[in-house]
């Protein structure tokens, strides 16, 4: 019963930007948007998170709409090694008894093609 | 720095046998701890989480159980395994110094025959 909706799969050409959308229309004011990715047979890896401003790090950029009901993860120059399942999650930032909603949705399977 | 380890990495067990998977975290105090399962080709299913010693919350009813005997130790157990228990089990932690982020162990691949 995840709070997010993502397309099940996407393809991207190597070297092109991969834009992965996520809908989170019920997000509350204190919830952040987190992105993780899981390469086959490994544990998920944190990519980026944000509250309302756009964020960028060495791995990706995160664009959050002004109403915060959706976001897009951007991999600017996708490589074959970016082929993975990408998960979008919304949750409060602080951990504790009332911030344990660490459930993942189905994610988007991104395939980067040569 | 913080590290998380889980073991064993791989195991093959007969139906009806017991199970014990262990996870330990180092470099942080009072973390939230999580057990996930991933069946072949499927997404991550949250099984249990714990906010402190002896405090376990179950997300799904099943023949598995979890325990947290120490602050940084989380154990997943079963008295009698079913075929449907096969899968990839992941332990994760969240807490200081990066609250809100999940850090995963290497995973344990269980095959029940």
Image: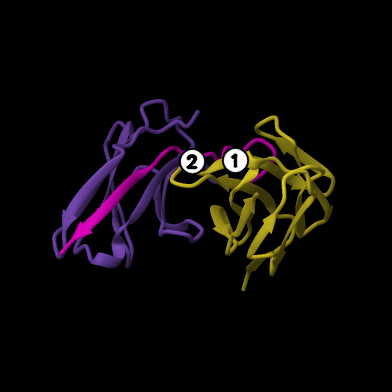
Chain drawn in purple: A
User: What kind of element bears circle 1?
Assistant: strand
Q: Is residue B95 above or below residue A66?
A: below
Disc 2 sits on a residue from what chain? Answer: A
* Crowd tier of the residue under label 2, counting other residues whose Cα lies within 10 Å: few below 14, some 14–19, many 20 or above: many
Q: Could you tell me residue A18's position as x and y percent? A: 20, 53
Decide whether residue B108 is among the magenta residues. no
Q: Give the percent coordinates (x, y) of residue B99.
A: 58, 53
Q: Is residue B68 left or right of residue B46?
A: right
Q: Where is residue A37 shown, x and y percent of the image?
A: 40, 55
Q: Which mark is residue B46?
A: 1
Residue at the image point whose x is 30% and y is 35% from the top: A70
Residue A94 visible within the image? no
Task: Name the quarter where the N terminus of chain B is drawn.
Answer: bottom right
Residue visible at 59% across and 40% down? B46
- Residue contact between numbered discs 1 and 2, judged by CB atoms under 8 Å: yes
Magenta segment: A94-114
Q: Which chain is yellow?
A: B
The tag on residue A104 is 2
Residue A46 x %, y %: 45, 58
Residue B69: numbered disc: none
Residue A10 seen in render? yes
In the image, A26 versus B19, the foreground residue is: B19
Q: Residue furthest top?
A: A26
Tell me the residue at 53%/39% (across/down): A103
Among the 4 quarters of the image, the one containing residue A32: top left
């Amino acid at each position: 019963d995840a709070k997010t909706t993502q397309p099940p799969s996407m393809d991207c050409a190597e070297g092109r930007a991969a834009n992965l959308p996520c809908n989170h229309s019920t997000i509350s004011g204190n919830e952040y948007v987190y992105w993780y990715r899981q390469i086959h047979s490994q544990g998920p890896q944190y990519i980026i998170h944000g509250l309302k401003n756009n964020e960028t790090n060495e791995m990706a950029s995160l664009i959050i709409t002004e109403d915060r009901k959706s976001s897009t993860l951007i991999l600017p120059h996708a490589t074959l090694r970016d082929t993975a399942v990408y998960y979008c999650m919304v949750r409060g930032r602080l951990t504790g008894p009332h911030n344990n909603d660490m459930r993942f949705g189905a994610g988007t399977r991104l395939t980067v093609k040569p | 720095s913080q590290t998380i380890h889980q073991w064993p990495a791989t195991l093959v067990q007969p139906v009806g046998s017991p199970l014990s998977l262990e996870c330990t975290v180092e470099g942080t105090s009072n973390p939230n701890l999580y057990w996930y399962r991933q069946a072949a080709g499927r997404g991550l299913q949250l099984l249990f989480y714990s906010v402190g010693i002896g405090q376990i919350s179950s997300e799904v009813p099943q023949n598995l159980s979890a325990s947290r005997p120490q602050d940084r130790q989380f154990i997943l157990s079963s008295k009698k395994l079913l075929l449907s228990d096969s899968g990839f089990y992941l332990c994760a932690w969240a807490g200081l110094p990066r609250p809100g982020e999940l850090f995963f162990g290497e995973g344990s691949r269980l095959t029940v025959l």
